[in-house]
Image: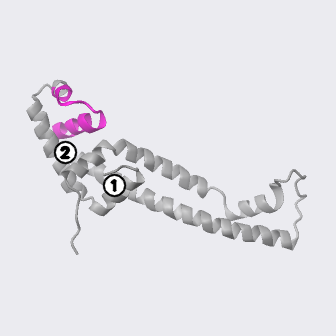
Amino acid sequence: MQIDFIRYHEVEALLRNFQSLRGAEEVLRMQLQSILGESENEMIESLALFRNTDGLPKSGGITSDRTGNIATGGIRKSNSEISEAAKSIAKDLTLIDAITRKMEIALNVLSPSERRVVELKYFEGLNWQEIADEMATSISTVQRHRRAGVERVRIVSRITVDDYNKIMKILDINS
C-alpha cells in the first residue's frame, strides 16, 4: 500500500490557513466540552425533577417509577445522539490537532531565515518586497528561503493527501 503525501502547493494552502486550523481546533474543543459537560445523573435529575417546561411548579423531589422510566428512556436516546455528535467532533478535533502539531514540529526545524520568511508570507500576508525590506535582503533570497522552508515543512510533516482533504473539508475550503 502506497501512502501519498501532500505536495508543495498543498503545504502552502495549510500554511495560509494555519490560524484557521487553530481557531477550528479551539471551537471544536469548546463544543466537545459543552456536549460532555453534564453527567448522566445530572441530566436525569434535571429532566425528572427540576426542569418543568410547562409552567407548573417544580416537583417536590418525589417521582413515580413511570416518570423515572420516561426520563431514563429520554436520557438514553439523548445520550446516543450526544455520543454520536461527540464522536464526530472528537474525530475532527483529533485530526486537526495532529495536523497542527505536525506543522508546528516542521516549522521548528526550519532555519531562522526560512521560518521568518514563511511566517511573514503565510501568517502575516506580506508581499515579497515587504519581506525583503523586513529582512534587509533581496526578493530572490527571500523567495529561495520560502521554497526551501515550504519544501522542508512538506517533508517533515508527512501529511497524507487523505488527511489534507479531510482538513480542507472541515475548514470548508475548496482545495
Label 1 Cα neighbours within 10 Å, binned few <14 / some 14-19 / many ≥20: many
Judging depth in this view, the residue of 17 and 145 nearest the camera is 17
User: Count of labels shown?
Assistant: 2
Tell me the tag on residue 110: 2
Q: Position of residue 161 (x, y in %)?
A: 27, 61
Coordinates of residue 7 in the picture (x, y in percent): 20, 55
Q: Amino acid at mark 2?
A: Leu
The numbered mark at residue 99 is 1
Quadrant where the N terminus is found in the figure: bottom left
Hey, which residue is sitting farthest front in the picture? 174
The magenta segment is 111-132
Q: Residue at x 72, y 61 (%)?
A: 43
| Quadrant of the image occupied by residue 145 | top left
Mark number, residue 133 = none
Above or below, comparing residue 24 to residue 123 in the picture: below
Residue at the image point whose x is 17% and y is 30% from the top:
128
Residue displayed at 17% across by 50% down: 152
